Amino acid sequence: MALDVSAPPAGFLDFWRERHVCTLTTLRPDGTPHVVPVGVTYDPDERLARIITGGSTTKVRHVRAAGPEGARVAVCQMAGRHWATLEGIATVSEDPERVAEAERRYAIRYGREPRENPARVVIEIALIRGMGNWPETAGE
């Protein structure tokens, strides 16, 4: 089911607040998908998903290779029969304030501070679409 990522149903948002390993799909230069496990945070108010990672990772190279307009990507998580996907345009930021905000949100979602990494960057995904089959909450 598709949804408005800036006003998601409660169950969808709750599912993205639970601790789940996610996947990030980027495209290699030959157009084939590169799928890796990541931690993701979702901010519907900003229509933004964030991933903290090292600046020299393959996923960062794929996003940067797309140029300043950003790269089309998808993040997905699943738990049993429930799943949720967010799609959008990814860019990479080295800005210390943006990285710190991503680290803060990661610590909240995953219940632990990320390990120290002076080469850390944040992949920010400007969200376009969300979809999935998430657990319902009362009132949905």
Image (cartoon, grey):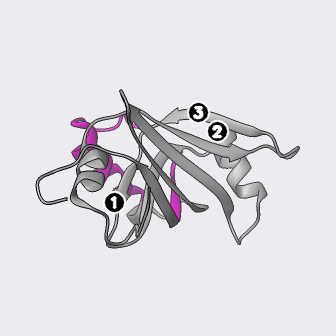
Q: Please give the label number shown on residue 83.
A: none
Instruction: Determine the secondary structure under disc 3.
Output: strand
Q: Considering only vertical position in the picture, is 33 above or below 44?
A: above
Q: Position of residue 55 (x, y in %)?
A: 60, 46
Where is the N terminus found, in terms of image quarters?
A: bottom left
Q: Is residue 118 visible?
A: no
Q: Position of residue 12 (x, y in %)?
A: 30, 53
Spatial separation of the CA atoms under disc 3 and disc 1: 22 Å
State yes or no: residue 24 in magenta.
Answer: no
Instruction: Determine the secondary structure under disc 1.
Output: helix
Q: Residue at x 34, y 34 (%)?
A: 20
Q: Position of residue 73 (x, y in %)?
A: 62, 53
Q: Position of residue 132 (x, y in %)?
A: 43, 48
Q: 103 or 90, which lies in front?
A: 90
The residue beneath circle 1 is 101
| Front tag of 3 and 1 | 3
| Sequence-earlier tag: 3 or 1 | 3
Instruction: Identify the amino acid type marked 1.
Output: Glu
Using the rendered view, name the quadrant where residue 48 is placed.
bottom left
Q: Residue at x 20, y 59 (%)?
A: 140
Q: Considering only vertical position in the picture, is 16 above or below 110?
A: below
The residue beneath circle 3 is 36
The residue beneath circle 2 is 57
Dot 1: within a 10 Å radius of its alpha carbon, few (fewer than 14), some, or many (20 or more) residues?
some
| Sequence-earlier tag: 1 or 2 | 2
| Front tag of 2 and 3 | 3
Q: Residue at x 62, y 43 (%)?
A: 25
Left or right of 9 on screen, residue 63: right
Instruction: Identify the amino acid type marked 2.
Output: Thr
The boundaries of the magenta stretch are 99-127
Q: 21 or 132, which lies in front?
A: 132
